[in-house]
Image (spheres, grey):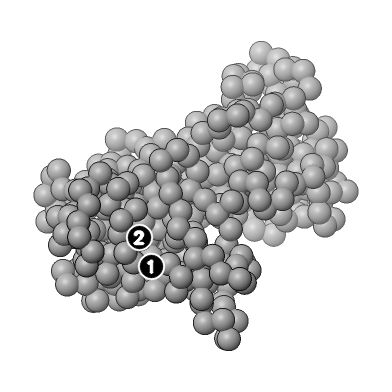
Amino acid sequence: MKKTGGGPAGFPRIVVKAPNWIGDAVLSSALFHEMRRFWPKSHVVVFARKKVLPVMRRLPGVDAVMEEEPGNLVRLSREVRAGRFDIAVSLSSSDIPALAFWLARVPMRIGFKGGLKGFFFSDAVEPPSRCVHQVFHYLKLGEPLGIGIPGNPSLAIRVTRTDRAEAAAFLRRRGVRTGARLVAFAPGASYGPAKRWFTSSWAVVGDAMQLKHRATVVIVGGREERPAALEVGRLMARPAVDATGALSLQGTSGLLSMCRAFLSNDSGLMHLGAAVGVPTLGLFGSSNPSWTAPFGRGNRVIWGLVECAPCYLRKCLPKRNYACLHAIKAQEVCDVLAGLAGFEPVRKF
């Protein structure tokens, strides 16, 4: 497609339906970056659910973000039509955005094949397999526009001075000294227990970081991760700093940007950490790191690869007893995490 359209200075007006998960929204940032490079003066508006709004507001290349009311087809189609967009791109697996774009009479409507939604797109794209990283899934949606897939794409999440100030104020309130060797933990995962390494193992790694490497462990996550954070802290010799539910998502990104390293289950925060530049170690059990590893150079994964993985189940089958998570050993996690943080190796504990 030529670089022309109905937007300012001949550049198109583009509407994008954001993914519904925080991690997916972070991974889509590479597509927004490439669209902005291709059309520097295009006008890009994103519709996103409430929990994803903070991510979309930090993406370079996005001009406006609007909250989507889940399931409200009529409202979405009306708002899209009022925007007089030239191009609509759906990053969602739902049929509703595709139908809304069609009802709004957007000339070019792009999204992945599958289900009913493919019938409402003018350009329905065949998704790659799950052996291809999800970043490249989203980038493939740029192909109908003539946007090539870069060989070395990058994620882009802005961390502002305000974000870091929120994090710094929290750390001061908790008595963490300026210049402390911070290591962040994210022991939660909203998808389900098949993605959550055991709290007892998190505590072992936390003790190694704090007692052997003189680091300060900070546990991040939403309010729903508070029980896991409290349990990890209870099991540690010296409790970690619990930031679960205490920071906004923007403040959490500011905190992660201040850390030496970040240990996370396969979760949205894992992708946020990688995007803001903290060396990230992702722990994988039921899911496939080929598809959703923390993206970018310098990040690492440990996969408890067993015969039944990846299964993508929320909960393990009873007879399997979370074998993939048991296959992740605390000693290996400590060694890799210490290396990412730039700590000197220590004898086995």
Q: Please determine whether, in this image, residue 38 is positioned above or below residue 329.
A: above
Q: In which quarter of the image is the C terminus?
A: bottom left
Furthest-front residue in this view:
347
Q: Please determine whether, in this image, residue 270 is positioned above or below residue 310.
A: above
Left or right side of 165 for 111: right
SS class of the residue under badge 2? helix
What is the number of callouts on the image? 2
> Alpha-carbon distance for marks 2 and 1?
6 Å
Q: Mark 2 points at which residue?
A: 333
Q: Which amino acid does label 1 sit on?
A: Lys
Crowd tier of the residue under label 2, counting other residues whose Cα lies within 10 Å: few below 14, some 14–19, many 20 or above: many
- Measuring from the top left, give residue 146's x and y in whole percent: 74, 25
Crowd tier of the residue under label 1, counting other residues whose Cα lies within 10 Å: few below 14, some 14–19, many 20 or above: few
Q: In which quarter of the image is the N terminus?
A: top right
Left or right side of 161 for 222: right
Residue 189 appears anywhere in the view = yes
Residue at the image point whose x is 14% and y is 55% from the top: 214
- Measuring from the top left, give residue 252's x and y in whole percent: 35, 50
Residue at the image point whose x is 50% and y is 43% from the top: 295
- The residue nearer to you, when weighing 109 against 131, is 131
Quadrant housing residue 115: bottom right
Quadrant housing residue 334: bottom left
Cβ atoms at labels 2 and 1 below 8 Å apart: yes
- Measuring from the top left, give residue 226's x and y in whole percent: 34, 70
- Measuring from the top left, give residue 321's x and y in whole percent: 52, 82
Residue 67 appears anywhere in the view = no
Q: Name the residue under label 1.
A: 329
Q: What residue type is labelled 2?
A: Val
Left or right side of 2 for 161: left
